[in-house]
Image (cartoon, helix red, strand yellow):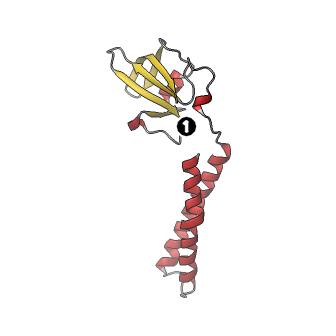
Amino acid sequence: MAALKARYDHLLGKERPEIVEIVSWAAGNGDRSENGDYIYGRKRMREIDRELAFLARRMKILRVVDPANQPDRGRVFFGAKVELADEDDARKTVTLVGDDEQDAGTGRIGWNSPMAKALKGASVGDLRLVRLPGGIKEWEVVAIHYA
């Protein structure tokens, strides 16, 4: 939520006013049909307005959840850091985060990803089948931690 709010504030408070100033200056120079500053400034302004609308919609429906307040710490829910082991005892740690925060490279998987859907509600020792593009893989929940 904080990252979305920061991006929204940056676009609305800094970037859009700069583009409006450029477009206003370019419009005052005369023929707008051949004025690159005017044409590309207007295009960039439309892009910014679209992104602002998207961010406003996302922030309106978002609900901030503090994983530290999770009452049932023995099961996997939003914000859980889960240690998994596969059939070959290869270990993997993932954290269930919002879809806007996901980053598979750092082990942060989106709440609506196939892995997260399979893990929801699991307890330590549970085996879960995950349907991935490469096929079905079985994971065992080894540990669950909350921040």
Kind of residue at disc 1: Gly
As drawn, the residue found furthest toward the top would be: 125
Rendered view: 66 above or below 86:
below
Q: Quadrant of the N terminus?
A: top right
Residue 77 place in picture, x, y as percent: 57, 25
Front one among 86 and 68: 68
**Residue at figure coordinates x 49%, y 21% from the top left:** 144
Q: How many numbered discs, if any?
A: 1
Residue 135 place in picture, x, y as percent: 39, 23
Rendered view: 2 above or below 90:
below
Front one among 88 and 10: 10
Rendered view: 45 above or below 74:
below
**Residue at figure coordinates x 37%, y 26% from the top left:** 134
SS for dot 1: loop
Label 1: how many Cα within 10 Å (few below 14, some 14–19, many 20+):
many
Please state if 63 lies on the left or on the right of 41 as rendered.
Answer: right
Question: Which residue is disc 1 drawn over?
Answer: 98
Give the image quarter of residue 137: top left
**Residue at figure coordinates x 36%, y 21% from the top left:** 91
